[in-house]
Amino acid sequence: MKKIILTLIILTGFKIQAQSICAGNTIAITPTSTLTNITGHTLNPGGATISGTLTSFIVSPTITTTYTILTAGTASNTSTVQVSIRTITVNPQPSIASPTIVQLGCTGSPTNGVAFGVNFYPNTNPTPQYSLTWLGQCVAQTYSMYAGVPTGTQCINNPALSFTGGIAPGTYDVVVAAGSCSAAYQFTINNASSPVTFSIVPNLTTVSLTCAQPNPTIAVAGAASNSYTWQSLSLAPFVGTAVALTYSNVGTLTITAQGSGSCTLTKTISVGINTTAPQSALSPTFQNVTCSVSLQQVTLTAINPSVNITHSVIPPGGGTPFNSNLNVVPFVPPSGINATSTYTYILFNNANGCSTTKTFTVGFNGANLPTYTLQSNSNFTLGCSTKSVTTINILNAQSNPTPGAPLSYTWIAPGGNTVLPNGPLNATGITQTINIPGMWMAVVRDNGSNCDSRVTFAVLLNTIAPSIDSVIVPRKILTCDSTSTILDYLSETPNISNAWTYLGNSGNPVNVATHTLLVSNNTTLAPSLSPLKIYTLTLTDNSSLCKSTTTLAIYQNIYPPKALISAIGVNSLTCKNPTITLTNQSTTNIPPNSIFTISQPVEGHVWTGPTPQPSLGSSSTYSAYTVGDYTLMAKDLNNGCVSYTTLSVGDGSIYPTIIASVTAFNIECGENGVVVTPTVASVSGAGSYTWTAPTGGLMSSFSALNPTITSTGDFTLTVENAVTGCLAPSKVFTVRNGTMSAGFTPSTIKDFAPKTITFKNNAAAGLITSSITTKWQFGIGSNTTLITGVVSGTASGGVPTTTDVLQSPAVTYSAPGVYTVVAYSGRGKCLASSTVIITIESAVSYSIPNIFTPDNDGINDVYYLTNVSGITHVNAVIYDRVGNVVYKAESHDDNGNANIFWNGTEGNAKALPAGVYMYVLDLKGIDNVAIPQQKGTISLVRKE
């Protein structure tokens, strides 16, 4: 027989759950099922399938979607499909769109700013409501926005999505939230970077590549933190501090300096080529010297350029060249030419080092002319000062061809007669002093042959002063920030010397011959509108000694600002005003309408305060919350000078004090109330009083210092100094009804006679213990002679009375007994009493044991009286059960320690058996009072 199993597919009940996500995110859908033997799950829409029992579907819907999960399995041995439904709600996801951050420029422009938008994914219309939360250099605040319209005032002082200016440096976070979805963006506002400065070395804006300098090096000088980038059309960008130029670099060279911050500075240099050769002329290019034809000078002319040139004539075979810097130069070849000679003439352009070379020839026909040379220390030129007169010398004159023949000499001035008489001339005229420019002639005659050797030469007049093309003054006004400058000059005139002249600090002239002059400010001088110093530049042509001068004034603007701190309100901290805002009210001290500009404010440069106040830089205000001295360093941005001022912020927090010698008050019996009487100090005449009463408490005024209180309870007084806002520590005043409570405490309630007992009075009327009268009864009748101590007197009937609870009566009890002591206390109409029982016993004491164990174990082996005190005589007789005397003893001790000792034997020899024995004791005390006879039984116990 076969078993047939039918499989039924049944759709069971639904399990519906809802979840939500932000658009763009994923979420796990985990099937839940009560089926067993789960074989798999199917997700719709999508048709995704998974197998197993513990797994999830990962979905990322962009719109709200309801998913159906079909779970296949077994329920009660029946194949079943269970349906789970998940609704995934998709919320729009906000995001910060297109953020733009603008940092503060180096010169304040542009101002800093931030701009951004808010987008949603997916695009939603209308735009969902959202909020912005700012976090950063301020207290976090939240601003609700709808469709981009903000509300409230945000912590960076502008609620818009786009704003500029006034954002403090720091890191900020902006969080946009819409429902449960949010996004964040972080941006940083930087500090303004310091401007970049640097100089080009040499200090030029134009550089020429010349014959003399085909590869000049250009360098930069500035802060070590600067980075320099060089670039031109022919030069790839590179970073460095110098570059060697070549002819390929002609054009504009750009140098960009990057400082340690974001600031840059760009300078340009124009690079050109100047390799043009100079143009020259010379005349004559050839001459022939005979006995009758004199040696002529050769005229050298610089055509272009005509200045800043050098003529150079190189004699045949080399030797020392002839050089001159004049435009037109006469060159006189040496006399006594006896061979044809060719000279090399080179004209140099000193500006670019380029040159032009030519030659000229001096011929010789064999005449026997004397030979000599002309020498002029001034290069045949008249100038200024001592060079307005020059001396020409004939050197090395010699007859030819036979040396040593007599010679004579003469000089022919410009325009003079060139026809000379026959015969010897001036035998000593080898030197001629000249102060007239023009064409001169030197003549040397051989007296034997009467042949003249003539040389024509030009004496030039050069009184043109050297040119001062420009004086370079980077800064004419020195300040506290710019403390020095370097004076320099440019001149096209060659072969010059210079001198800077000024009055030194001692008042004496100072001459400095350096090309540049460092000028520094002098802060030891008082600020002034007068020049710091007046500098004179003198250039001297070393050839002509002609001079050019120019003067310039250097000023210094070292006026310190007028530093001033102003406190808004008072300059004392109080409880009402725990913080004071200090403001910078500093002003410039620079005179108006002067050569010094006043276009910038005086900055609150650095604020410092007492600990724990932090320092603060570049701020117009400063919050003071600590008592002490505050210092402001004010900086005048017009000249960089600083000055300091201090403001003391005092402690104005005057705290009042509640003075109360009594804080507990009673409403006396029959009275309606009581006036509380505190006083107050340190309220500056403007105290504010506030009473806080218990529930149901009544008083005449809740704002008076001394109200009448008509109910009981604890009343709290708070006092405020109305000027400073400071509160005194609250004080509680207790008001009770004036009910009397009598009570006292004896020093002991049980003792032996005779005994003096002191009674401490505890009587009180509410909380008040003063002005209480107490009458005493000490349990001894009306006899007051036993009372000692502080007692004020005796009332009628002989009752002792005390008038203060601090008084403690003392009574001596001489006889044993039980005494009832009563204290009657009263204050006003209120009365009370208190009773205490005092027990006075005899001085005799003892205890009679009823068992002992004489078995020699060291424990309870002997029978004797215990706790004996005051017993002077003991007579003891002990009987057995049949009346036989088994022990008899008598003891006497005047000190009160009489006692008997029985070891359980008869006659101290025979050990008696265990059992019960009887005793009879006759005792006498130390007070000579007979004690009643004591009888009883004793159990004698022995170990078996």
Image (cartoon, grey):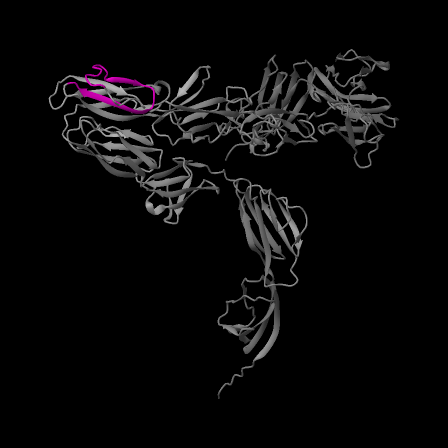
In which quadrant of the rendered view does residue 867 lie?
top right
Tell me what residue is drawn at x 60 percent, y 13 percent: 895
The region drawn magenta spans 421-447
Relative to residue 496, is residue 159 drawn left or right?
Answer: right
The percent coordinates of residue 184 (x first, y second) are 56, 52
Q: Which of the 4 image quarters holds residue 79?
A: bottom right
Return the residue nearer the eye: 414 or 917.
414
Task: Residue at 48%, 43% (x, y): give it.
Answer: 262
Name the residue at the bottom extreme: 1
- Which residue is at the front of the view, 491 or 121? 491
Q: Position of residue 194 (x, y in %)?
A: 50, 37
Instruction: Please tell me which residue lies in front, 696 or 931.
Output: 696
Does any portion of residue 611 appear in the rendered image?
A: no
As drawn, the residue found furthest toward the top would be 785
Q: Is residue 742 visible?
A: yes
Q: Magenta stretch: residue 155 in it? A: no
The x and y percentages for residue 477 are 51, 28
Question: Residue 533: where, in percent of width, then height?
Answer: 48, 21
Depth check: 508 or 90 in front? 508
Q: Confirm whether the magenta stretch covers residue 445.
A: yes
Instruction: Report how many numbered discs are placed on residues in the image.
Output: 0
Left or right side of 473 for 322:
left
